[in-house]
């Protein structure tokens, strides 16, 4: 098709893609083109702005490597990751435990840890946390034998792959639920932290006058054949950034009950007040058990 006027461009591109034999790919690609062309027309995008946008995408690619995924961070910071998560796991998903973002820091092959064991693998100052959690199906029956990944940032606000002072796999562990659907572990109370701001996402936040902070949370991934894999987070209640999470990941059902203890017998001899306990129940639904692709290796 020879282009006669500006309006012809969209029609020509859509016609060129009609030969795609995958119906879902054809649907997604066509919708992408229609919306991108409509965006360009709506804002009357200038050539310098177009060049800036392309370079911004190139910078996201250059900032992504084995230890950091800037593309995921960008999707998180504009709310797309949460939107995709809620569309796929909202009213049609588990009703008592909502899914949440995988985030850019999940790693496969976390150390297998016994139930009740510690995920603190190098000196990590901070209040002790004792978590006891259960996994049930939608009918409330305990789910035995589920594999559960847990990972978190340190009280200093860093995941271990960001911090040379932490041992490899510090504050990460893999558990298996018992006959009661239970798994438990010892850790330290997580702290909120800023997302990395030394790349293009940081530039975007600064120009929009947005803070870079996530509220304190634990990450949990629950996997068992016959059930839809649940990726979720449990946020520390009372955190100052619950209402303004930089990646828009806080939903009401994800706010946990981190209970502070200042007196009484501590759970272990080496624990001093204050320490925290967390009890939480996760609900998983029947479906396909598939693991996500790790954002970092």
Image (cartoon, rainbow, N blue to C red):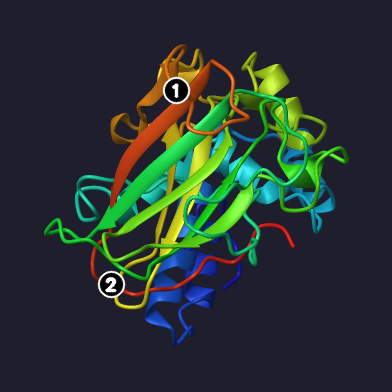
Residue at horizontal 48 percent and vertical 17 percent from the top: 239
**Residue 127 seen by the camera:** yes
Residue 43 in which image quadrant:
top right
Q: Is residue 38 visible?
A: no
Picture coordinates of residue 84, whole percent (x, y): 41, 50
Counting from the top left corner in percent of width and height, residue 199 is at 80, 36
Among the 4 quarters of the image, the one containing residue 231: bottom left
Label 1, label 2: how far apart the Cα atoms are? 43 Å
Q: Secondary structure at mark 1?
A: loop
The relative height of residue 192 versus residue 141 in the rendered view (above or below) is above
Q: Is residue 275 left or right of residue 207?
A: left
Q: Foreground residue, 177 or 246? A: 177
- Residue 212 at what x, y percent from top left? 65, 23
Instruction: Determine which residue is flagged by label 2.
Output: 287
97 w.r.t. 190: above or below: below
* Disc 1: CA contacts within 10 A as few (<14), some (14-19) or many (>=20): few
Give coordinates of residue 110: x percent, y percent. 64, 61
In the figure, 216 relative to 208: above or below?
Answer: below
Q: Measuring 47% from the left and 36% from the top, which residue is drawn there?
A: 130
Q: Which residue was labeled with disc 1?
A: 265
């Amino acid at each position: 098709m020879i282009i006669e006027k500006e309006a012809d461009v969209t029609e020509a591109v859509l016609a060129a893609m009609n030969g795609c034999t995958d119906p879902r790919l054809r649907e997604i690609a066509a919708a992408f083109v229609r919306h991108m062309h409509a965006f360009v027309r709506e804002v009357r995008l200038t050539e310098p702005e177009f060049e800036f946008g392309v370079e911004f995408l190139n910078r996201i690619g250059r900032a992504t490597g084995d230890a950091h995924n800037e593309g995921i961070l960008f999707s998180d910071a504009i709310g797309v990751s949460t939107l995709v998560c809620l569309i796929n796991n909202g009213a049609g998903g588990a009703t008592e435990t909502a899914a949440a973002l995988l985030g850019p820091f999940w790693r496969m092959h976390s150390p297998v840890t016994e139930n009740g064991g510690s995920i603190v693998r190098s000196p990590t100052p901070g209040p002790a946390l004792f978590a006891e959690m259960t996994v049930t199906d939608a009918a409330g029956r305990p789910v035995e034998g589920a594999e559960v990944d847990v990972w978190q940032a340190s009280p200093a606000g860093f995941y271990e792959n960001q911090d040379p002072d932490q041992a490899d796999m510090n504050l990460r562990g893999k558990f298996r639920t018992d006959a009661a659907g239970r798994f438990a572990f010892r850790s330290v109370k997580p702290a909120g932290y800023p997302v990395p701001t030394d790349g293009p996402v940081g530039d975007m936040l600064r120009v929009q006058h947005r803070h870079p902070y996530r509220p304190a949370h634990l990450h949990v991934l629950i996997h068992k054949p016959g059930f839809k894999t649940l990726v979720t987070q449990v946020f520390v209640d009372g955190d100052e950034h619950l209402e303004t999470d930089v990646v828009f990941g806080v939903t009401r059902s994800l706010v946990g009950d981190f209970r502070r203890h200042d007196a009484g017998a501590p759970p272990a001899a080496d624990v001093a007040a204050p320490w925290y306990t967390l009890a939480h129940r996760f609900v998983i639904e029947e479906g396909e058990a598939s693991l996500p692709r790790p954002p970092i290796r």
